[in-house]
Image: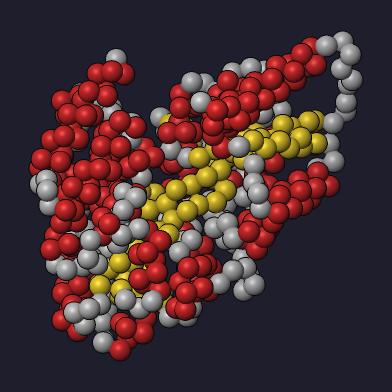
Amino acid sequence: MGENLPVWGDIMKLIRLAAAASFFACSSFSSASAETELKLWNLTSSSDAVNKHWEEVIATFEEAHPGIKINYETFPSDAYKTGLQVALASDAGPDIFFNWSGEDAAVLARNGLTADLTEIGTKPGMWGEKIAPGMFDAFSVNGKIHGVPTHLITKYMFYNTGFFADNNLSVPTTLGELKASCKAIREINPHMSPISLGNAEKWKGVHYISTLNQKIVGEAQVAKDYALDGNATELFSDPGYVEALQTLVDLSQAGCFNKAPNATTADASRSLFAAGQAAMIYCGNWCPGTFDSEGLEGGYDLARFPAAENGKGNQDYNFALLEGYQISARTKNMDAASTFVNFLVSGETQAKRARDFGRLPVNASHMGEEDGTPIFRKIAKDAGSYAGLVLILDVGLEKSVSEHYLSIIQEVLNETKTPEQAMGEIRARAQKAKEQQG
């Protein structure tokens, strides 16, 4: 219980701040100001680079917009998640605030706590002209945009360029080609793992299945099922879900993965690839730092995850998790708030974020040769061409269902359960969750 006291204290701090601000807003002792004041809430960071970045960004904005003052406050993530909704329900919550995409943002929108930004974004010079349309899906509810992404986390299939070149191998572009590549690599070097996979913490397997679900089942059906939308008895009934799990089994049986992937950590899987003991790895944009520091700098490249030949999904979607900013539905300064959010996705600010602390921008228009490594710039450029974003299973799906999905992927990979058995359990969990929602 004692371990939770700091978090509860931070939550109460959020609530007290909102209450105090509300009191002073109504108090006769408050002083009038010609400035428009915006409250901006963000997560606390221990990084000096991050903190310095925000000081400089706010100073630059205020200099360009002398009538607007940004009051910047930060909070620990656990307290932030819990206290934000309480604060937003008062008139003294933040005008602008950081949030994760997916359910964290959607729940606030559904509760009427965030502003509908759809029309504002279509105005000349606004974020609709600066960001690929598909990136707004992660902050959308019922076709309306309720947040603006500012940076993303994404994944690619990295491959060892030297090994592929030396053995005249082509980078696989379809799942069929991927299976064939695995067999070819095993024949070339039986001790080389075609793909390094570390699923001990379960989330690596979830990333595979999230991607395969979108490519095979299709993004529209996946979004509906993850939202538990529709008749409870029909949830997750598309046969593509079984096919997605079976594809993971097929890859394993084709010899694609290292030994005991469910006992291998994500860190260890990155080191296997960096050490040249695996030819490929499905990894995030944070992974090149490990590859470079462990000796593979300049020895790898990337490609998008292979397409499902007969899949129902748009094969130009890519795995990505977006983070960004929302505007309170209660703000009295919508024009000023939207101006600041638009400033965050300007090419200049986005390039600065990349330089200052390595954030992958959603708008790479101003990135130069000095902004990150060649791989970083390649990812940033490619991210602007995504047709849409793969909905991540444990971000978009109700918690009791997603947690079971995480565990059952391990069982399927171990072949202790068949894909059919696994999806039977997922359907039952989803139906129960749907019924509990009422």
Q: Work out whether residue 40 can be spotted.
A: yes
Q: Residue, x 56% and y 72% (percent of image)?
A: 373
> Between 386 and 27, which is closer to the camera in this rendering?
27
Residue 97: percent from left, percent from top? 62, 35
Q: Residue, x 15% and y 25% (percent of image)?
A: 233
Q: Quadrant of residue 165?
A: bottom left
Q: Residue, x 65% and y 63% (percent of image)?
A: 355
Residue 154: percent from left, percent from top? 44, 56
Q: Work out whether residue 218 can be spotted.
A: no
Residue 236: percent from left, percent from top? 19, 35
Left or right? Give the position of 341 relative to 163. Answer: right
Q: Residue, x 34% and y 32% (percent of image)?
A: 399
**Quadrant (top left/top right/bottom left/bottom right) for the C terminus:** top left
Counting every numbered tag in the picture gives 0
> Between 229 and 257, which is closer to the camera in this rendering?
257
Left or right? Give the position of 125 relative to 249. Answer: right
Left or right? Give the position of 158 relative to 240. Answer: right
> Between 307 and 30, which is closer to the camera in this rendering?
30
Seen from this angle, which residue lies furthest front?
A: 2
Q: How is the image coloured?
A: secondary structure
Residue 293: percent from left, percent from top? 51, 73
Left or right? Give the position of 307 relative to 53. Answer: left
In this view, 338 is above or below 419:
above
In this view, 304 is above or below 346:
below
Q: Quadrant of residue 385?
A: bottom left
